[in-house]
Amino acid sequence: MTAPWSQRTTVTREFPDNAALQALFGPHNVNLERIEHVLGVALNTRGNTVAVSGSPQSAAEAGAVLDALYALAMRQGHLETADIDAAIRMTAHPPEIAGDLVLRTRKRHIAPRTPTQSTYLAALERDSLVFGLGPAGTGKTYLAVAKAVSMMLKGEVDRLILSRPAVEAGERLGFLPGDLKEKVDPYLRPLYDALHDMLPGDQVMKKLAAGEIEVAPLAFMRGRTLSNSFVILDEAQNTSSVQMKMFLTRLGEGSRMVITGDLSQVDLPPGQRSGLRDALDILGGMDGVSFVTFTDRDVVRHDLVTRIVRAYDQADRTRKAASAEKP
């Protein structure tokens, strides 16, 4: 809500780099308009100077958002709508974690876009075993892959191993066409997509061929000890308790392990308990293990995705309340 004129204050920011300034403003000042709309301020530009008018708090927040976005534009040369929204979120709710959490890969630098993502990246840096829990679109897997690629490029791990259980929406591998690789590749495609977002395509293929990067279904992990590796298990809500224990005990010397999943989207047969739920109950409070829970506020995809997640959460709560009232 826009503050009355009697309660408004004005702060100014000056940005000397013209290329970064152009990225900050966006085409036809679209980025400035988004900041105005969300924070309830007025932004007026003159040359390289931006005047921010609003309540003392909103004007200060908008100034901080502009500073953060200008620094990002200087670093990466362009801004996306998600960057604008991320800067607003991070300014309104600054993370408790301090320090440089930017992950550097060959194709892009990746920074946290929500306070929970900051907490997650700090846990990935600190602990050998991290669980990332929450709805789709919150960056659980993407950030884990980014951290793994960053560590591999710095020589801190020798291998990157990405895995998922081949269980999706009631489908069974035997009914899919092709050989085993052709059957399981569709389940692993999101992991390939994340890799290609961070490394040139020829490097991804080279590292896959050399075994430095391995993308495999969960069943391929049995009997192995994974040392000096960064290991990620995605969609872990679809593991059984036996599978989860098997995977967790693959952790070898010098390795990191990340488990991601969303317990609201379990595709296991009715009555079968999720291995992810078991792991949360059994490992909670153990030293060296972190649990980071994302919510709909951490969704960094299209705005509509956030509203969809919230609508489904509300529907689930309504159904549970109705079931509890039945005799």
Image: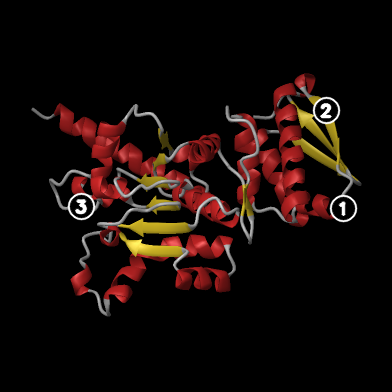
Look at the picture and state if 326 lies above or below 154.
above
Residue for point 52% across, 68% down: 204
Name the residue furthest front: 253
- Compute the Cα span from label 3 to label 1: 54 Å
Q: Nearer the viewer, residue 139 or 6?
A: 139
Q: Quadrant of residue 296?
A: top left
Residue beneath disc 3 = 268
Q: Mark 2 highlights which residue?
A: 10
Q: In the current view of this chain or complex, which residue is farthest to the bottom?
A: 178
Query: Mark 1 or mark 2: which comes first in sequence?
Result: 2
Observer-nearest of 62 and 83? 83
Find the distance from the CA under tag 2 to the CA under tag 3. Answer: 56 Å
Q: Which residue is mark 1?
A: 18
Local secondary structure at mark 3: loop
Earlier along the polypeptide chain: callout 2 or callout 3? 2
Can residue 293 be seen here? yes
